[in-house]
Amino acid sequence: MVAVLKPSATSEQIENLTQWLKERGLTVHISKGEFYTILGLIGDTSQIDTELLESLEMVDKVKRISEPFKSANRKFHPDDSIIEIGDLRIGGPNFQMIAGPCSVESPEQILAVAQSVKSSGATILRGGAFKPRTSPYDFQGMRADGIELLLEVKKQTGMPIVTEIMNANHLPMFEQVDIIQVGARNMQNFELLKELGKTNKPVLLKRGLANTLQELLMSAEYIMAGGNHNVILCERGIRTFETYTRNTLDLSAVPLLQELSHLPIIVDPSHATGLARLVQPMALAAAAAGAHGIMIEVHNDPAHALCDGAQSLRPEQFAELSGKIKKIREAIAI
Ligand code: PEP
Ligand code: MN
């Protein structure tokens, strides 16, 4: 971190500031120019509040050189992280297809969707039991019963399951769940992230509706700082001024996150677009961009889905997509 001091900074002010920074464990290199004095701060600057530093009377500006996220940072972990779930691997050269309905609705629905997506190549089953709905009058999910149904289908199909948590008090219900999803609306629910950090469960962390990639990585950092390094990032579109789509899929997030971090990255084109007809092209683009997997909403009867029917693929559409993904993966491997 570098702090540029104002020409008006007195020797006493510089001495006091240097002392304050040293007390915080930093080494301070002072270089005095004709007009400006520059302090080079070396050490763990993650504890330093840059805004506070910049607000001091003698400070002109402050610039961070290194990123504030450490555990998620590729600089300190050059190899891709690979998260293991049984004999399934997420990250590195592996590609996983997560598919299933937005919400678990009935035993018949979740089993039928699971069997069909499994037969066309899905490796992980998704299904919401606790649903974060914008309106309190909308279907809120089957809650604990939904988790029971997912566990039943996991037993019958052998598919690992991913489902969303909204409240840390619900953690005991997620004991048999393979991947715990933190939804976009909870990406910055720091107390929830801290609790997940105490577990060793893989966490699928979705990017918030209006959050930067650095904020996403800082949320991953919350989980990792607690000791749980099994974090999977998910790009699911962000809010922009565009209204034709539900969100705007930020595909550049994929190569950028790979540059910045060693964590696996999954793309969810269903929530990113909100429109079933856009899901296939965006899923193919995600695979081409180098994502470690995709998450697709699939429903056996989208017209009657209790949640997100408009963006849900029918099983045969998922089968077609799955075949094309294979070809894209082969093409980019060349
Ligand atoms: C979901 O995946 O079911 C979901 C609610 O997604 P998001 O948090 O990205 O809106
Ligand atoms: Mn949904």
Image (tube, helix red, strand yellow):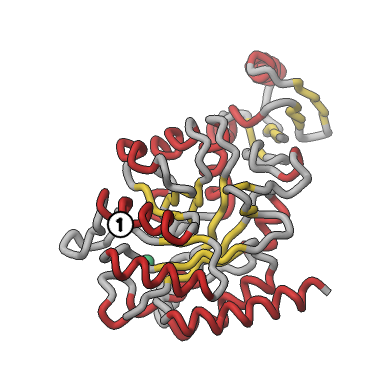
Task: Give the image quarter of residue 196.
Answer: top left
Q: Position of residue 81 (x, y in %)?
A: 69, 47
Q: Position of residue 158 (x, y in %)?
A: 49, 57
Taking depth in this image into account, of 242 and 74 the one nearest to the observer is: 74
Residue behind mark 1:
132
Q: Position of residue 215 (x, y in %)?
A: 53, 48
Q: Is mark 1 within 8 Å of ligand 1?
A: yes
Taking depth in this image into account, of 83 and 279 the one nearest to the observer is: 83
Residue 3 vs residue 165: left or right? right
Q: Quadrant of the N terminus?
A: top right
Image height check: is 311 above or below 231? below
Q: Quadrant of the C terminus?
A: bottom right
**Mark 1 residue type:** Pro
Image height check: is 97 above or below 215? below
Image height check: is 306 above or below 146? below
> Residue at point 76% right, 20% down?
27
Task: Give the image quarter of residue 127.
Answer: bottom left
Residue 296 vs residue 329: left or right? left
> Residue at point 26% right, 62% down?
134
Q: Position of residue 29 (x, y in %)?
A: 80, 24
> Residue at point 45% right, 55% down?
161
Taking depth in this image into account, of 104 and 37 the one nearest to the observer is: 104
Label count reads: 1
